[in-house]
Amino acid sequence: MQMPIQSVEVKAAIFSLKKGKAPGNGFTPEFFISAWPIVGLMVVEAVQEFFRNGRMLRQAKFAVISLAPKKATVNKIKDYRPISCCNTIYKSISKILADTIRNCIGNLVGPAQSTFIPGRRIADNVLLAQELLLGYGSMRGPKGCVIQFDIEKAFDSVDWGFL
């Protein structure tokens, strides 16, 4: 996590970003890829500066927050999902951080947290909850309670046609 970021990592991050996505405020990944011989060195320096000093170019800090409809007909604010359109430099920094963390996430996330690590499934938690609930109906053992949470995912279905 403390190793300096190499130029090949920055280039790999830029070139791996999804194409055809709207930029938050700036240029798309396609621009950086096509103009890499011209802008590559400046992009690498900007990203490395962030990892060295924690400072980001002011121009790279911008993002556009937009509301995307979750379904065809929207009547309430909860029918929208907020999305953040970050610029390409910001996305590349996030990608490098995510790739770096991916290598050590197994040591950071506990075994009960199942959806953050490849190979673990959220369904495992459902099975565990079912096993616990089986014992609550019996008269033996300590008294307990069950709490149900209805958590709506931030990445609910989106009307991609609208986007």
Image: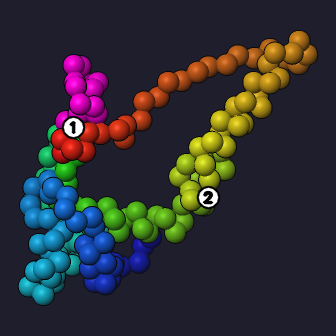
For residue 84, side relative to residue 107 (left or right): left
Q: Residue at x 22, y 24 (%)?
A: 74
Q: Residues within 10 Å of mark 1 (few under 14, many from 20)?
A: some
Task: Compute the Cα span from label 2 to label 1.
Answer: 31 Å
User: Residue 143, position in %: x, y?
Assistant: 80, 14
6 in the magenta segment: no
Q: Residue at x 22, y 25 (%)?
A: 73
Q: Is residue 57 visible?
A: no
Q: Could you tell me the amino acid type at mark 2?
A: Gly
Q: Residue at x 31, y 78 (%)?
A: 12
Q: Residue at x 49, y 65 (%)?
A: 102
Q: Residues within 10 Å of mark 2 (few under 14, many from 20)?
A: few
Q: Is residue 46 visible?
A: yes
Extreme right residue here?
A: 140
Between residues 68 and 106, which one lies in front from this camera angle?
A: 68
For residue 6, side relative to residue 151 (left or right): left
Task: Work out which quarter of the rendered image holds the C terminus and state it.
Answer: top left
70 in the magenta segment: yes
- Name the residue carrying label 2: 119
Numbered disc 2: secondary structure: loop
- Name the residue carrying label 1: 68
Up/down of 156 relative to 43, above or below: above
Would you identify the image quadrant in which residue 11 lies?
bottom left
Numbered disc 1: secondary structure: strand
